[in-house]
Amino acid sequence: MRVQSSTDRHQERSVREPSSVDTEVIIVGAGPTGLMLAAELGLAGVRPLILEKYPQPRTTQKAQGLGGQILRLLHYRGLLERIEAAVTAPEPPQRYPFGGVHVDLIGMVDPPLRGLPLPQTRLEELLAERVDELGADIRRGHEVVGVSQDDTSVTAEVSGPDGPYRITARYLVGCDGGRSPIREMAGIAFTGTTYPEVNRLCQVTVPDSVTRLDNGDIEVPGIGRISTGFTRTERGAFGFGSPTPDMLMFSTTEDESTDIADDEPMTPAEFQDSVRRVLGTEIPLGETLRLARFTFKDRHAETYRAGRILVAGDAAHLLPATGSGLNTGLLDAVNLAWKLAADVHGWAPAGLVDSYHEERHYAGDRALRQTRAQVALRRGLDPAADALREVVQELLGDEQSARRVAGFIAGTDVRYDLPNPNRHPSTGTFAPDLALRTGDGATTVADLLHTARPVLLDLADRPELREVAREWADRIDIHTATTDDRPADALLIRPDAHIAWAATVGEPADSAVAGLRAALSGWFGAPDRIPVLAADQGSEGR
């Protein structure tokens, strides 16, 4: 059957778009990355179609937390409060695992890394609600079994509940996981290492037979004291932690060559068998709250784009440590969405969609670097490896070192290599959430980015810069404000909250105007109109 167009705008823009497309963007996979991409496209005025092969949302317990730079981005979209309201477990102490050691941020002012105890299933529910609010179409039970493309469109062969059909779009994005069929069909190489390692996790209530000690350790009959942290034996590693007073978390790590699917359910008996192999004994378990099994793969897509097919999230990268994959994938979606939308709307400059690969492949490389370092730290079992972990743990006792590594984990250290003629240190970085004073009252950078539109933020009352920006007024918002200790005279902020250009404090008008015009053209295409001079206002919106 032939699927009807998701919007009537194709008819109106037939000169600028292929006449045969049924929808603008197809997203394959309704996991967190696919849903985030759909939400961001919706904000940018594009209604995507999501195709998900499973008929119902998955209930397998995967990620149990959300953290890193994506929390700042969600705040900039006005969604963080909704996420926080869904968290029912106490927020754990700011102490994060790093390859068998810990990064301790407890007591720090403005820590560079924060985590929320939110199960992935609940995150997907919240993102699906957001996608529904923005009008995207999610079709569950529809599996993409083939793709083909030409210079103007991509066609998906779909197996749906009512039989096979075809659907054509401007772009197709594979957000379909580490075993991505879309990546394979697109011919994108996915090289790397699969570690012969299986990790099992068991979260339980405290059984009556276990005694909790004041320092967080526990006393177990027949075993003795089990200390917080990791116990290594010749057969693997056993981990223990207590995130809340009424909860215990145990883990095992064993070298196994069998390829085990992470989404296959694990039983308490399987976990106890693993504990017996590692420790030589069993441990008492209370009521089971969570069981999970996961393996570690170190893989990176050679390219994130093959023509009109792109990949994001786990389909683009698999990281060999917990705590970074979800953050990295969601940020892929945010980077990609506004660029696809620009192309759909017809104003994208040359190379804009290609910059998705350039920027996010770089970010993926950095995420792989820190997770590979964790592999080297955690897998060694000899005295030399123990000494390495002890030295690294000692170094992480210094706040500067802890901040550096925490920023690495969070992805807050990513700075894109963007054109920067005046070498402003902010260019390419994530925009700080400045407190702003405008003619309309107090606001923040985060408030200005709720709509995911580009922003020119004039912090020094530079009317010549606002005049230039008005030529792009159909695409960007212009705001005049003041702030304490301004980092620049003006900031051009992309929809993904990264700074595309910044005017140095006191920069001469000639160079500032030329720099801004080049940045506007380079990121947001040719101007749409000649500016109409108007009285300057404290804040100029759409």
Image (tube, rainbow, N blue to C red):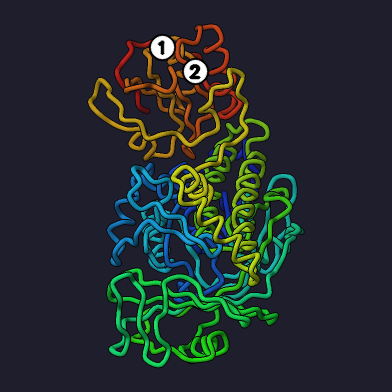
Q: Residue furthest left?
A: 441
Q: Position of residue 166 (x, y in %)?
A: 64, 63
Q: Are marks 1 and 2 in contact (CB under 8 Å)?
A: yes
Q: How many marks?
A: 2
Query: Marks 1 and 2, how far apart in space?
Result: 10 Å
Please tell me which residue is depicted at 51% across the width and 62% down the height of the picture: 101
Mark number displayed over residue 503:
2
Q: Along the line of sight, which residue is nearer the eye, 347 or 177? A: 177
Residue holding disc 1: 462
Depicted 507 relative to depicted 246: above or below: above
Foreground label between 1 and 2: 2
- Please, what is the three-letter code of the amino acid marked with disc 2? Ala
Drawn side of residue 246 relative to residue 344, left or right: left
Quadrant holding the N terminus: bottom right
Secondary structure beneath label 1: loop
Depicted 454 relative to depicted 490: above or below: below
Q: Position of residue 70 (x, y in %)?
A: 45, 49
Q: Position of residue 392 (x, y in %)?
A: 55, 55
Please tell me which residue is depicted at 36% across the width and 11% down the height of the picture: 534
- Neighbour tally class for label 2: few under 14, some 14-19, many 20 plus, Cα within 10 Å: many
Please tell me which residue is depicted at 62% across the width and 41% down the height of the picture: 359
Drawn side of residue 383 relative to residue 507, left or right: right
Q: Position of residue 528 (x, y in %)?
A: 53, 22
